[in-house]
Image (cartoon, helix red, strand yellow):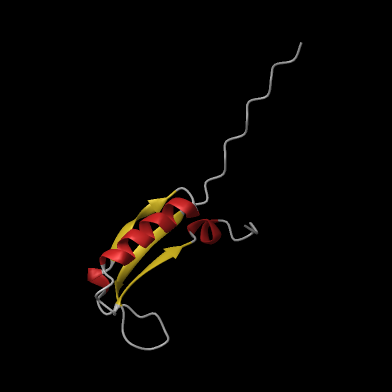
Amino acid sequence: MSKPKKPEPKQQLLHLVIGGEVEKGEDIVFKDLDAVDLVGVYPNYAVAHAVWKQKAQLTVDNAEMRYFVVHLHRLLNPEDDE
């Protein structure tokens, strides 16, 4: 009798939420890199998106404040297509 296979660990699709005041224009240029808000790293897009939405809503009165979700898993594993 063979042993049952252990389920393979679920792949983490890491996402970073980051924000700060940006300069006007089409390019994303932070005004002050020392003031950039590194919110955190999250295990999937759904969680990161929820945090991004919360942070963006808290700063809605500041037109120059922008938050972003960075797909870290794409940077760490560029050969993955996800």
> x, y (%) of residue 38?
31, 61
What residue is at 57 percent from the left and 56 percent from the top? 77
Q: Nearer the viewer, residue 15 or 57?
A: 57
Residue 44 or 79: which is nearer the viewer? 44
Q: Is residue 45 above or below residue 67?
A: above
Q: Quadrant of residue 29?
A: bottom left
Q: Is residue 71 found left or right of 63 in the rendered image?
A: right
Answer with left or right where residue 37 lies relative to residue 1. Answer: left
Q: Residue visible at 65% across and 59% down?
A: 81
Q: Residue furthest bottom?
A: 25
- Please tell me which residue is depicted at 33% across the width and 59% down the height of the picture: 54
Name the residue rendered at 49%, 61% in the picture. 71
Residue 21, placed above or below residue 8: below
Task: Report x, y in % for residue 42.
Answer: 42, 50
| Residue 57, horizontal then vertical, whole percent | 31, 65
Q: In the displayed structure, would residue 65 be above or below residue 41?
A: below
Q: Quadrant of residue 10?
A: top right
- How many numbered discs? 0
Residue 56 is situated, as x and y percent measured from the top left of the image, at 33, 66
Which residue of the protein is positioned furthest toward the top in this rendering?
Answer: 1
Q: Nearer the viewer, residue 70 or 52?
A: 52
Say which quadrant the C terminus sits in. Answer: bottom right
Viewport quadrant of the N terminus: top right
